[in-house]
Amino acid sequence: MNKKLLSIAILGTITFSSLILPIAAEAETYTVKIEEAKETVNSNQNKIDAADQKINGLSAEKNKTQIQLEMINNTISTNKEKSQKLVGEIKLSQDEMGILKTEIESLEKKIEKRNEQLNKQARTVQTNGDTQNYIEFIIEAESLVDVIGRVDVISQMVTANKTLVEEQVQDQEMVVKKKIETEQTILQLNALAAQLEKTQSLLEKQLLEKEVVVSQLASEMSLAQEDKDAFLVQKVAAEQAVSEYTLAQADVEKAVQVAFEQQKQEEAKVVVEASTNKANETTERATVETVKVPTQSNSDGSSNQESDTSVSVTYPTVNTPAPTKKPTPVIKPAPIPTPSIGGGASLGSMQPAISKALATGNPYVWGGTSLSSGFDCSGFTQYVLGSVGISIPRVASAQYSSSAKVSNPKAGDLVFFSINGGIVDHVGIVTGGGGFVGSQSSTGVANTSYSSGWWSDKVVGFGRY
């Protein structure tokens, strides 16, 4: 009997152990998942810290470049002022040159007249012998006073001719000098203008180079920010997984505890059942008792005698029903739902928001998220989908990660690009026929194509919300 009781107890223990052990194993599985999720959280936190450090470094470099840009702009402004002043001086010199040309023409006319007069006098001296005439003019004087007077007249005539020749020479020299001075002034001004123009061109080149650097830094900061946002999304998801796995593990542990309690109760019931069965077996035996029955006197008056007569008395069997065994409940955590691909938002419902952005000629603004100030690519898609009540992450990479991927996009789905062949860094809204609308740095909000042209080889995939 003890062996039977032991067998029942062992059987019950094995039965309940077969139910409890899988639950305990499931609890252990959740422990592993929790540790893995925590490692993911720590890994993403390290990546977020690295992204922050990179963003801070890029921001400092961008600020430094911005200061250099301001200095170049100030120098360009100063040079423009100098150039304008120089242009005025060149114009003034050109005006002076014009005046000088007029004066030179006048002097040349005077010189020409003097040349004619001098030539005429020279011919007169050659043909008429004016020198002899001068002598005769003196000899014919009637008195000494007349001689002195005539000599004075001749002296004045000679002096006048000499003065005429000297003026002629001076005027010719003055013409040459003014021409040289004016030409030198204009040459100097032109050389200075050329130098300023060269400097201006160099500064504008430097300005363009710095603007390219700023643009590259802004792009790198945008990518780093998108990386950080993606890591944040992954970190939040891992933290949520830790929370869900912890709750699930608590449910499983609770189920294990409940199962153990039920096992104890069932083991106690088994012991009671075994005892009851033993009692039943005892009562099932036929019980025989010996009863002495007195012998009564006969009719003939003979005396009564006692005799022992054995009488078998059978007691009714009492059957106690065995308790009903209840199955052990197993508590399992509810599975985490996975998103299913539905119809997605329609382009028609988004069209009012898109039309507003197109009508206002909304410019590309890095980090922009509003119709009034401008959009970047992911700010535009977030704005448009938000207008129809759909909330999506802020940056392109996170929008790609959280979207339901589709291979046959329809109008209203998102198209994602990778310009540098790495992380997703651009996004637009599919408009149909291989086209999309998005906020590009070169055009602002505009319609373009992803099936041909510049964007065709940069498509990563399509997503639906």
Image (spheres, rainbow, N blue to C red):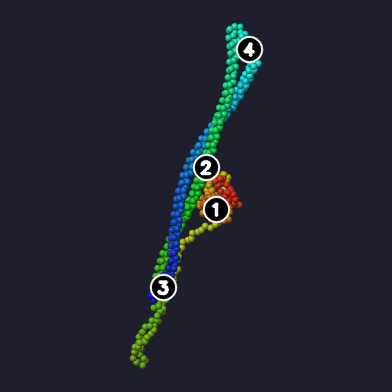
Per the rendering, the mark at residue 460 is 1
The answer for how far apart the CA atoms under marks 2 and 4 are is: 87 Å
Determine the residue located farthest toward the bottom in the rendered image. 300
Which residue occupies 43% across, 74% down?
A: 321
Query: Badge 1: few (under 14), some or many (20 or more) residues near its Cα, within 10 Å?
Result: some
Contact between labelled residues 3 and 1, with CB atoms less than 8 Å apart = no
The kind of residue on which mark 1 rests is Val
Question: Which mark lies nearer to you, 1 or 3?
Answer: 1
Viewer can see residue 348:
no
Give the mark nearer the N terminus: 2 vs 3: 3
- Residue 75 x, y percent position in the rendering: 50, 37
Quickly name the residue at label 3: 8
Which residue occupies 58% across, 17% down?
A: 163
Give the mark nearer the N terminus: 2 vs 4: 4
Query: Badge 2: few (under 14), some or many (20 or more) residues near its Cα, within 10 Å?
Result: few
Quickly name the residue at label 4: 133
The answer for how far apart the CA atoms under marks 1 and 3 are is: 65 Å
The kind of residue on which mark 4 rests is Asn
Q: Is residue 251 above or below residue 70?
A: below
Question: Which image quadrant for residue 102?
Answer: top right
Give the mark nearer the N terminus: 4 vs 1: 4
Question: Which mark lies nearer to you, 2 or 4?
Answer: 4
Question: Dot 1: what SS?
Answer: strand
Contact between labelled residues 2 and 1, with CB atoms less than 8 Å apart = no
The answer for how far apart the CA atoms under marks 1 and 2 are is: 31 Å
